[in-house]
Image (cartoon, rainbow, N blue to C red):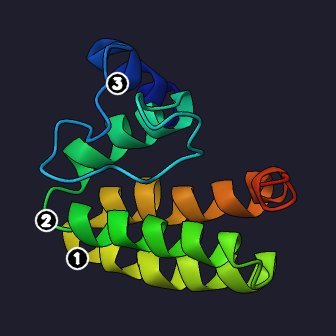
Amino acid sequence: MLFLLLCRFALLGFAISQRNCGLDYKWSCGATESQMRLSLSEQMSCAVAVPLCPRTLNAINNCCVRHDSCYSQKMGQQFCDDLFCQCLCVSQLDGPLCASQVGAGFCVLVRVFGVFIYNKPQ
């Protein structure tokens, strides 16, 4: 399944450079590196979420915004990650692919890699 996701990302190309991921609002899922361009993790999350979660995309993005805010306020990494994973349950409304690849996938990613972002000096 990961191979399929990487292929999908390759097909979309690395040209996603807008801050909004082609949406009407700012895409906020992934580790932000620049206000001018989407980071690689933001591009990848966009490439996966946009086609799989059309009805819940805005709600998923709001989960990411709240997660970023929770990290910024240093409310505790596990606490923030737990809230994020719970918030992502909304992805189930878009079906099993969205729920497994975006909901569960994004949850696993923050639990594994979130420590690097949470402990990064601001």
User: Which tag, 1 or 2, sits closer to the chain's start?
Assistant: 2
Q: CA distance from mark 1 to mark 3?
A: 22 Å
- Count neighbours of disc 2 (C-alpha within 10 A) and say few if under 14, some if 14 to 19, many if 20 or more: some
Image-quadrant location for residue 36: top left
Q: Check if mark 1's residue and mark 2's residue have beta carbons within 8 Å.
A: yes
Q: Check if mark 1's residue and mark 3's residue have beta carbons within 8 Å.
A: no
Residue 16 vs residue 102, the one in the foreground? 16
Q: Position of residue 112 (x, y in %)?
A: 78, 56
The amino acid pointed to by label 2 is Arg
Numbered mark located on residue 8 in the image: 3
Query: Mark 2 sits on what residue?
Result: 55
Residue 30 vs residue 102, the one in the foreground? 30
Query: Position of 108 compared to 8: left or right?
Result: right
Q: CA distance from mark 2 to mark 3?
A: 19 Å
Reply above or below: 18 against 61.
above
Numbered mark located on residue 76 in the image: none
Query: Position of 50 compared to 105: left or right?
Result: left
Query: Position of 52 compared to 71: left or right?
Result: left
Query: Mark 1 sits on what residue?
Result: 93
**Residue at the location (77% across, 55% down)?**
122
Where disc 3 sits, the SS reads: helix
**Residue at the location (25% across, 49% down)?**
52
